[in-house]
Structures are given as C-alpha cells and as structure tokens.
C-alpha cells in the first residue's frame, strides 16, 4: 500500500515540477487581481482579526499605485513608507481595497481566493521562495498535482497500472487543464475539490467507512466555497448510489439504512464551510445567499452567449462541439471506448465504478447543454468533466490493449509492445503542446483544422487564453519600448499584468489616446470576443500597423501597436481630415445628422446647452447607417471614457465621441432621459476622412 501511494505521489510530484518549471512563462489570469485583493483582505481578517493592513507597503506596491490605483485614489504618494527594497509584501495587500471594500463584494465564493492568498503569504512574504504573482499560481499548481496523483492511484487500484498511466497522461496533457493549472485559481481548484468529493464519497460507500463520507462533505464544502458547480453533484452521486445499493445484499443494505443521518450532516458540513469561508454572506446571511444564487442565475441562465449553437428545443451543442474539437483525437477515441465499456458494465456486470465515471463525465456537459442554460469561454467553467474523461480514456486504452493482446496471442505470441504503442500515440500531442506553449489552452485539433480552422468556422471563443499569454507582450515591451513610454490595453486594465514586472521607466497607466495619437503602446489580445467591436479595439486594427504580433497556427493572439503617425497604415496616411458641420435634427426623441453622402468617420464633437430645467444624463449611445434603414449600434455608452486622455464624456457642456473609420451617411444619437441636457445641441462638429 505504501509503495502504491508513494508511486502516486511521485507521479503527482513530476507534474508539479513540470508546472513549476514553466510557471514563469504565464501571466496572471486577466480577472485575477480582484480575486487576489479579496483573498488577501479575507485572509488578513482570519489571521489578524483586523479589517485593515498594519504592515507598511512594499516598493513593488509603489509602482502598482503609480500606474493603477492612483487613477481612482490619487494623492497618497508622499505618505507611503517602505522599510527597505528587500521588504516583501504582496501588492494585492492594497490599503485602498481591504475588507471594508470586499465584505460587500458579490460574486463567486471566496475559499480559493483565501487559499491562494495564504500560499502567497507563506511562500512569498514569509519564505521568499517565489515571486509575488507566482505564489498565487502555486495554489492551483499544488492542487492540480494532487488531482494527478489521485487519478493515478484510483485508476491503478481499480483497473491496473496501464490504465492509470494512460488516465494520468490524458489528464496531465489535456491542453486546457495543463495551461489553466498555472494561473487559474477558481476553475482548477473547483475541479480538484469536485473530484476529491466524488472519490471520498466512493471510498466511504464502497468500503462502508463513515469517516470518508465526512471527508467527502469537507471537500464538498471547499468546492461550494469556490464555485457553485458542486450543486450539480447530486445528479452524479445519487443515481450511482442507487445502482450500487440495489446491487448489494440485504445485509449490506441494512448497514446503509443506519446512515440516514448523513442526509442531514453531509449538506450541513458543506454549507457550514461555505458560510465560514465567505465573509460576504455574514453581512446578511439569507439575503446575500439569495444574491449569490441570483448572480449564478444571471451568468448561467439569463444570457445566451452562443445562440448560433442552439438546436431543437433550445438545446445547446456548443459545449459538446467545443470538447470534440479541442480534445486530442486519440483521447476522443479512447474516452469513447471507455464510455461504451462503462455502459456495457452497467448492463452486464456488478461493477458500478465505470458508471460513476460516466455520470461524472456527462452531467457537467449536459447541464450547460440544456435549453436556457448558458456557457461562455469554451468549457473552462465545466472543467470537472476532464478527470472523468481521462479515467474513461484509461479504461478504454486498457481494454483495447487486452483485447488486441488476446487476439494476437491466439495466432502468434504475446505482443507486449501494444501498450507501449498506445502510449507512443501521445507523442504528437506533447509536441503540439511544446509548440503552442504558453498558449496551450488555444489548442484546436485536426478535426476543425487547428486554431486557424476554428477562426474560419467562427467557433465562439476561439483563441481565448484567459490572459495567460500576456507575458509575451510584457517581455517584448521591456525589451523594445523606448524610455518612459506609456502602455495601454485594448480592453480591461493594465493591472491584468503584474505591473511591477514592467521596466521601471515604463508607465503602464492605460492612457489610451485613440485618434489623438499621443504615442502610447496599445496591447491587445485578439481572440474572438464581444470586445473586438469596441472603438478601443477597432481603432488600432484599422488605423495602425502592429509593431509586434504573437501568432499560433498563423492566427494572431496578441498584437502591440505604437499609436503615432509613423505607424499609421499607408492607406490611412493618404487620407485628409476635414470637418463638416451638418445640422442636428430631432426625430422621435432622437438626434440625427445627415452627412449628405457616405463619409469615413473619425469623431464627433457636440456642444450643448445646460439649462436648469434639463435632467442629468443617465445613458447615451450612437447608431450609424448608410441608408437610414439598417442601423448599427456602437458599443460605447455615455457617460463613459472611450478615450482615456479625454476623460469621462460628456465633460461640462461638451461630448466628444470617437469612431473607428466606419463609412456611413447617417449618425443617430439617443439619450436617456429624453430631457437630458445633452439633447440641447446648439453646435456639432464631425471630422471625416477623404
């Protein structure tokens, strides 16, 4: 037993080391800073009982404040005290974003945020073993290594060494799991806790050990404290337990009857951990719990992100198609064989474990495929299917090897190289991962023609790496940007990078200047998203030649532009800028301008009269058209800041709105409420290209 456990730990350790050796190549996840800030504020409350940080700030935080925090909370630079350059404190222990801010933060539960923060406190602040940003990622890496060891041990115990090796290899090389394990502190921990909950439950039931049911509920609490995916676990465990129970003798069934109290204790433990690790709930337990449920309903039911994949009765084919075209074909085949074996065993034998794996594989996929359910960003949010798929693939590979060995042995001699041959078929996948690194989660298989084929076939979410490849841009800018250059991003914030890693003289202050061309570098992830149609993304794509492109399979995933006249596209340089002053007309409570012909737009400047009787602006937006019948609504809304250097618009009695060179004749402006001051237009200037 010790040898078997030791080998599983060794396998997990190999995966852990491989992840550590490549960790430096990945950026933090693009929404990670919010989780880091919240995790530190909650961890500080648990560890010190205080809602504020007593420690002084670090030198790295001074840089973080200068480029990011100072834009919302200016004027504190002179009050900072840094003990020494070697003093270590995470920049995400932000005095302006402590517990008082995050105690009312609605979103995903916070268990994994706290776990990542504790890893940072121990490994970075106390021991100094790794850098600030990387210490958070070690939380996900450690847990993913635990999962790899678990899968190997479980499958080896149940189906033998060869099945265990294949299962572990499938899991460890699954492109999405491999990449996200470096930086995703929400979905990866959820996968691990989800898996541990199932495993411990199986151990407790199959071996009639009550303590393992308790352990399962603890892991279930960790899972619920991370994301709500675990609420679908009953659809896996209950059907499996019923089948398992019916296959037992009457005497064995009676033993389970005495466990009736688990029906109350199991969920009680889960929700107790959820409550204890989520301070947001403490403020108003019932009301805030209902708010969390509403949060999940909104992102999981109320928005249809992939309408083109809806089929009969509203079923969503997107998750199944995504899995089919982002899984290595050999793994698809093996997992299909494993699934068929699981079904066969369900009908023909008393071995119910394959049924558990099959339910585990299917339930996460089915629940986001049902009518009205929704999913986005590929299948990152249901990654809990991956371990089950890996195990089924191991079962399938083992069955194929045994069948072929038996077939050959009847005619020739035992062919012991078959298992090696099956393993060798994973070499192409490993080579692909090496080539894609660090964009492994942008992998698409040959069934769709790779990433290029996914783009050409308009697969929603193609190329999305969750910001993990941003470090490519950071390295290029540190090496090539001129002294004191400014850096902006195509969407979100420059804080999606770990800002202290930028060269000291660079200002990653996100001051995007658009058509004003102040010379900043614009960094953008160029995968498929809803954001490529914003001005901030369309302007550099249409007007500027990139100075750096990072490509995978010939598809750009990162572009960097220099926003100055020298880097304008040649066709743009040939155009002349002229201003026109069309009359603003009002129709159906909307203002519109007729340019007299199709023009290529640059910006519009509106001057309006502010009367005492008019209302403040709540919402405004522009629409454009060539024929006044077919209108395109621009994504920018006002009040808003599509160009940072201009500040929030409207500003005083003036509103400036940019366009990305669209060719139109009519412009329409809508404001709410209808009696907003901005509707009292007395002058408008429109700049166009000719």
Image (spheres, rainbow, N blue to C red):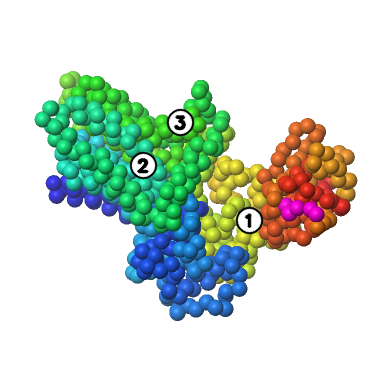
Precedes in sequence: disc 1 or disc 2: 2
* Location of residue 212 (image quadrant): top left
**Image marks 2 and 3: residues in contact by CB distance under 8 Å:** no
Residue beneath disc 3: 369
Left or right of 619, for residue 249: left
Q: Position of residue 566 (x, y in %)?
A: 73, 57
Q: Residue at x 46, y 63 (%)?
A: 99
Query: Circle 2 — which element?
Result: helix
Whether residue 341 sits left or right of residue 365 in the image: it is: left
Numbered circle sitting on residue 230: 2
Give the residues in magenta: 613-617
Coordinates of residue 316 in the picture (x, y in percent): 49, 29
User: Which SS does the magenta portion mostly show?
Assistant: loop
Percent across and percent down for residue 549 are 58, 50
Looking at marks 3 and 1 on the same chain, the residue that comes earlier in the sequence is marked by: 3
User: SS class of the residue under badge 3?
Assistant: loop
Classed neighbour count for the residue bearing mark 3: other residues with Cα under 10 Å, few (<14), some (14–19), many (≥20): many
């Amino acid at each position: 037993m010790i040898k078997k456990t030791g080998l599983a730990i060794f396998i997990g350790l190999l995966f852990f080391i491989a992840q550590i050796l490549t960790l430096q190549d990945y950026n933090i996840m693009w929404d990670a800073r919010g989780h880091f800030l919240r995790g530190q504020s909650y961890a500080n409350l648990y560890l010190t009982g205080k809602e504020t940080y007593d420690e002084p700030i670090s030198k790295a935080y001074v840089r973080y404040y200068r480029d990011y925090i100072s834009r919302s909370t200016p004027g504190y630079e002179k009050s900072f005290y840094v003990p020494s350059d070697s003093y270590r404190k995470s920049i995400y222990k932000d005095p302006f974003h402590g517990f008082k801010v995050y105690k009312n933060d609605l979103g995903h539960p916070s268990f994994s945020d706290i776990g990542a923060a504790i890893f940072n406190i121990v490994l970075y602040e106390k021991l100094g073993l790794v850098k600030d940003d990387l210490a958070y990622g070690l939380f996900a890496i450690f847990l993913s290594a635990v999962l790899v060891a678990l899968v190997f041990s479980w499958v080896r115990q149940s189906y033998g060494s060869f099945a265990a090796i294949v299962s572990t290899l499938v899991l460890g090389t699954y492109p999405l799991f491999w990449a996200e394990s470096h930086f995703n502190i929400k979905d990866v921990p959820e996968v691990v806790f989800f898996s541990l909950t199932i495993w411990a439950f199986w151990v407790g039931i199959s071996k009639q050990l009550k303590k393992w049911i308790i352990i399962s509920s603890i892991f279930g609490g960790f899972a619920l404290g991370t994301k709500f995916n675990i609420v679908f676990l009953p659809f896996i465990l209950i059907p499996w337990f019923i089948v398992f129970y019916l296959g037992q003798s009457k005497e064995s069934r009676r033993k389970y009857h005495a466990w009736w109290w688990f029906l109350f204790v199991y969920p009680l433990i889960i929700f107790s951990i959820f409550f204890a690790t989520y301070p947001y709930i403490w403020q108003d337990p019932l009301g805030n719990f209902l708010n969390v449920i509403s949060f999940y309903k909104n992102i999981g039911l109320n928005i249809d992100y992939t309408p083109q994949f809806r089929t009969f009765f509203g079923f969503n084919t997107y998750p199944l198609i995504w899995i089919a075209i982002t899984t290595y074909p050999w793994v698809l085949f093996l997992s299909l064989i494993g699934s068929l074996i699981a079904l066969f065993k369900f009908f023909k034998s008393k071995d119910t474990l394959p049924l558990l794996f099959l339910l585990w594989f299917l339930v996460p996929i089915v629940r986001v495929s049902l009518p009205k359910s929704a999913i986005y960003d590929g299948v990152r949010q249901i990654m809990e299917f991956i371990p089950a798929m890996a195990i089924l693939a191991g079962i399938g590979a083992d069955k194929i090897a045994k069948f072929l060995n038996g077939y050959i042995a009847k005619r020739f001699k035992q062919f012991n190289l078959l298992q090696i041959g099956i393993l060798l078929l994973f070499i192409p996948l490993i080579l692909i991962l090496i080539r894609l690194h660090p964009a492994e989660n942008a992998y698409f298989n040959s069934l769709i023609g790779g990433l290029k084929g996914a783009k050409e076939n308009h697969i929603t979410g193609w190329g999305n790496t969750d910001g993990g490849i941003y470090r490519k841009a950071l390295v290029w800018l540190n090496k090539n940007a001129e002294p004191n250059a400014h850096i902006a991003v195509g969407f979100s914030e420059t804080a999606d990078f770990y800002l202290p890693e930028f060269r000291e003289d660079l200002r990653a202050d996100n001051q995007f200047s658009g058509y004003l061309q102040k010379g900043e570098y614009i960094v953008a992830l160029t995968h498929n998203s809803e954001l490529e149609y914003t001005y901030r993304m369309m302007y550099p794509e249409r007007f500027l030649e990139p100075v750096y492109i990072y490509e995978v399979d010939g598809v750009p995933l990162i572009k960097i532009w220099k926003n100055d006249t020298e880097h304008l596209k040649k066709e743009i340089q040939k155009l002349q800028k002229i201003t026109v002053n069309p009359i603003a007309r009002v129709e159906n409570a909307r203002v519109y301008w007729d340019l007299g012909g199709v023009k290529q737009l640059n910006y519009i400047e509106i001057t309006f009269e502010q009367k005492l009787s008019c209302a403040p602006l709540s919402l405004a937006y522009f629409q454009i058209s060539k024929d006044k019948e077919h209108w395109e609504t621009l994504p920018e809304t006002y009040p808003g800041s599509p160009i940072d250097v201009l500040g929030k618009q409207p500003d005083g009695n003036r509103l400036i709105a940019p366009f990305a060179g669209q060719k139109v004749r009519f412009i329409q402006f809508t404001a709410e409420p209808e009696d907003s001051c901005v509707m009292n237009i007395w002058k408008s200037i429109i700049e166009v290209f000719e």
